[in-house]
Amino acid sequence: MHNAQKPNLDDLPTPGKLWRSTAIAAGAAAAILVTVVWPSEYGIDPTGIGGVLGLTEMGEIKTQLAEEAEADRLLMESEGEPQSSLQPGLLDVLFGAIVGTAHAQEAPAEASTWTDEITFALEPGEGIEIKLVMEEGAVAQYDWAVTGGAVNYDTHGDGSGNTISYEKGRAVEADAGELTAAFTGNHGWFWRNRGDAPVDVTLRVAGAYSEIKRYD
């Protein structure tokens, strides 16, 4: 049997070195938390690095989806129905039709010629987000309509460390009007099909925007 060599006390780290190593590790963990985890998971970007890396927008989308899912869960609990059988209520459908009609009447006349038109399909439970890249104060006209059912939607914006929700609706068949950017960034819509059948959504836009972004 070989006797283990007794360590030299001079080779062991001093308490000061241990504290220094611990502080460095804690600082690195905190830096990763602030610059990577917070922006990518929660859309919180105090340093601005997350926005440069494209992580903040991803976190804002995750947060928005979580909020929308929680709202649906609370609605299902109040109605006492399982998610698989959730159908738009009669009042929701009527309200959606009224809101859609009212907004359609508000659509500006200059939007008669649309710059872009996009049609996409949503399976039951599926969601999609489309945003316009706009400068602060820029105005875009829009008109969207659902074929085959109704959708939940959230008109919102994000960018430059800011987020805003302009309008939300449940079981809505159409909406139209003007979207004025509250700040420079991405402004647009998130739709989710909470029905039991596929639907098609057609979006038409015109006005002051430089790009259209789509997030499936």
Image (cartoon, rainbow, N blue to C red):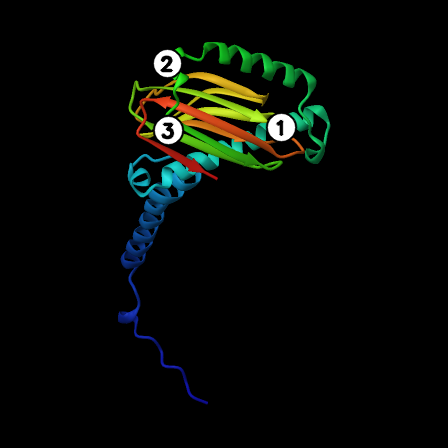
Q: Which residue is mark 2?
A: 110
Foreground disc of the pair 3, 2? 2
Q: Which residue is mark 1?
A: 148
Helix, strand or loop under label 3: strand
**Mark 1 vs mark 3, CA separation in Å:** 26 Å
Amino acid identity at mark 2: Glu
Question: Looking at the image, is mark 1 or mark 3 earlier in the sequence?
Answer: 3
CB-based contact (under 8 Å), mark 2 and mark 1:
no
Question: Looking at the image, is mark 2 or mark 1 earlier in the sequence?
Answer: 2
Q: Using residue 56 as the reference point, say whether residue 168 is left or right of it.
A: right
**Mark 2 vs mark 1, CA separation in Å:** 28 Å
x 38%, y 20%: residue: 113
The quadrant holding residue 6 is bottom left
x 50%, y 28%: residue: 202
Question: Taking the image as drawn, is residue 43 in sight?
Answer: no
Question: Looking at the image, is mark 3 or mark 2 earlier in the sequence?
Answer: 2
Q: Using residue 16 as the reference point, say whether residue 145 is left or right of it.
A: right
x 59%, y 17%: residue: 96
Q: Which residue is mark 3?
A: 132
The quadrant holding residue 2 is bottom left
Q: Using residue 215 as the reference point, say whether residue 53 is left or right of it.
A: left
Give the percent coordinates (x, y) of residue 49. Answer: 29, 40
